[in-house]
Amino acid sequence: MKSDYLHEKHFSVAEALQTLYINHSLIEKMQYLAKTLDRLGFDFRPGNFDVDSAVKENGTYPREYELLIQVLVKLGEAGIIVKGIEHGLVDFPHVRANGEEVYLCYQLGEESIHFWHSLESGYSGRKPLDEI
């Protein structure tokens, strides 16, 4: 495998589907915790995180935040790249037959992995999986 890829781990389509199946409940939990934290007024998003306003009076983070971090770590350990916590948007690094590194893309609510996109294009550049 080429050494100049951005990611060390790559999934075949079958491996991505299996990994999604195994971790689907964690992706649902991630979204649920994000929405719960949002309702509590806890802004965890990068660039918006304010520790002073986010920490409770006793100096601890909300339990939901600690659980969210645990979920994100588990997803990362599975090789899943989280792109949108609130939307349940995740990517699986993949190498096309032509050697191009891309992402297989899934969002909660979709029945399976149906899309892929280049590393640069992101969600707006999603293409049908049959075009990979």
Image: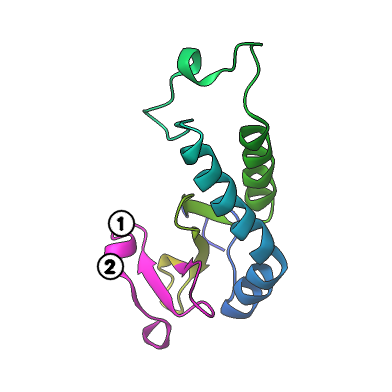
Asked whether, in this view, residue 106 is left or right of residue 122, the answer is right
Which residue is farthest bottom? 130
Q: What residue type is labelled 1?
A: Glu
Against 114, residue 47 (above or below) is above
What crowding class fits label 1: few (fewer than 14 Cα within 10 Å), some (14-19), or many (20 or more)?
few
Please state which of residues 97 and 43 is positioned toward the viewer in this rendering. 43
- Tell me where residue 49 sits by quadrant: top left
Horizontal and vertical percent position of residue 54: 51, 21
Residue at 68%, 62% in the rendered image: 25
Q: Which residue is drawn at 46% across and 16% down?
A: 53
As shown in the figure, which amino acid type bears the numbered disc 2? Gly
Mark 2 crowd level (few <14, some 14–19, many ≥20, 10 Å Cα): few
Q: Residue at x 57, y 52 (%)?
A: 32
Which residue is tagged 1?
A: 120
- Asked if residue 120 is among those painted magenta in the image, a careful observer would answer yes
Does 53 appear above or below 79? above
Q: Give the range drawn in magenta.
A: 104-132
The quadrant where residue 21 appears: bottom right
Please tell me which residue is depicted at 69% across the width and 40% down the height of the picture. 70
Q: Name the residue under label 2.
A: 125
Horizontal side of 63 relative to 127 (left or right) equals: right
Res 6 seen here = no
Q: Position of residue 110 (x, y in %)?
A: 48, 76
Badges 2 and 1: C-beta atoms under 8 Å apart?
yes
